Image (spheres, rainbow, N blue to C red):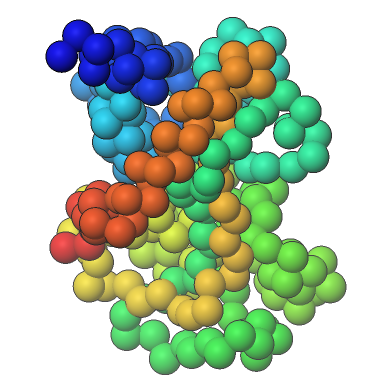
């Protein structure tokens, strides 16, 4: 029995005792946000599920984005999300598999006769609501620059959604998850219709600070994330935020 115990210590050294990771993010509902002094969100729930399996505790810190990235660079925090991957960031960040995404989609009111099959130029007679300086994917951004599409600009996503229901424009362009979670909260899921296909979808990650050397955790993270997709627990979390 004692021999088996020491063998298990050799195999799972980092998971035998509970440890704590400091993870930084921004106020970005429904991905992560503070409610009643607690950080919640669908990304937070997914991460909590994964790290509970690893017997690892998490402390979430909602910070300005530039400060959060700087902390990862300097090893002052363990990980950051939702983080995009690029060559510059790979110099200071290690990545497990993508655990989330940022899809941009178009929405119309339920009784609208607007249809879409992938050709944005056929929607040129309509006005689009979009947040100032947000990218909506290369195809959409290019159509705007060329004057094919006309925008009604909002200062933030909340204002954009309010303008949509006031019929200040015809087509809402927004983060799909933000819209669906907001509609559920407002009990208006039946009043809006999504146009397909979506405009863009960027994979996002939990980026680990290279200076922390969390390679063993990353491997286990990938295994549990895969099992969440297989056993349906991942989709269960999504549905709790975005479906009736």
Which quadrant holds the C terminus?
A: bottom left
**Of residues 139 and 17, the one drawn nearer to the viewer in this rendering:** 17
Percent of width and height locating residue 243: 22, 62
**Of residues 128 and 69, the one drawn nearer to the viewer in this rendering:** 69
Query: Compared to 114, does 76 lie above or below?
Result: above
Query: Compared to 219, does 37 lie above or below?
Result: above
**Of residues 203 and 233, the one drawn nearer to the viewer in this rendering:** 233
Residue at figure coordinates x 59%, y 14% from the top left: 212
Q: How many marks?
A: 0
- Left or right of 4 on screen, residue 202: right
The answer to whether residue 65 is seen in the rendering is yes
The residue at the far right in this view is 146
Residue at figure coordinates x 79%, y 40% from the top left: 87
Query: Compared to 39, does 211 lie above or below?
Result: above
The answer to whether residue 158 is seen in the rendering is no
Percent of width and height locating residue 64: 57, 21
- Left or right of 161 on screen, residue 151: right
- Left or right of 68 on screen, residue 89: right
Based on the displayed image, in which of its 4 quarters is residue 85 positioned?
Answer: top right
Residue at figure coordinates x 39%, y 16% from the top left: 10
Which quadrant holds the N terminus?
A: top left
Residue at figure coordinates x 74%, y 42% from the top left: 86
Based on the displayed image, in which of its 4 quarters is residue 117 positioned?
Answer: bottom right
Percent of width and height locating residue 15: 34, 19
């Amino acid at each position: 029995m004692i021999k088996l115990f020491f063998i298990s210590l050799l195999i799972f050294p980092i998971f035998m005792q509970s440890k704590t990771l400091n993870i930084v993010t921004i106020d970005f509902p429904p991905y992560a946000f503070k409610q009643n002094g607690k950080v919640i969100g669908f990304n937070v729930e997914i991460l909590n599920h994964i790290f509970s399996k690893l017997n690892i505790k998490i402390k979430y810190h909602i910070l300005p984005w530039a400060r959060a990235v700087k902390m990862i660079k300097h090893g002052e925090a363990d990980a950051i999300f939702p983080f995009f991957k690029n060559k510059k960031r790979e110099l200071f960040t290690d990545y497990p598999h993508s655990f989330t995404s940022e899809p941009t989609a178009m929405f119309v009111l339920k009784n609208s006769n607007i249809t879409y099959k992938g050709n944005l130029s056929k929607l040129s007679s309509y006005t689009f609501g979009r947040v100032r300086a947000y990218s909506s994917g290369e195809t959409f951004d290019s159509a705007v620059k060329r004057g094919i599409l006309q925008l009604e600009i909002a200062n933030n996503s909340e204002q954009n959604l309010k303008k949509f229901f006031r019929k200040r424009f015809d087509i809402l362009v927004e983060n799909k998850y933000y819209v669906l979670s907001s509609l559920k909260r407002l009990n208006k899921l039946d009043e809006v219709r999504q146009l397909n296909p979506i405009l863009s979808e960027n994979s996002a990650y939990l980026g680990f600070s290279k200076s922390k050397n969390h390679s063993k955790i990353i491997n286990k993270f990938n295994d549990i994330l895969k099992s969440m997709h297989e056993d349906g627990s991942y989709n269960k979390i999504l549905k709790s935020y975005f479906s009736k």
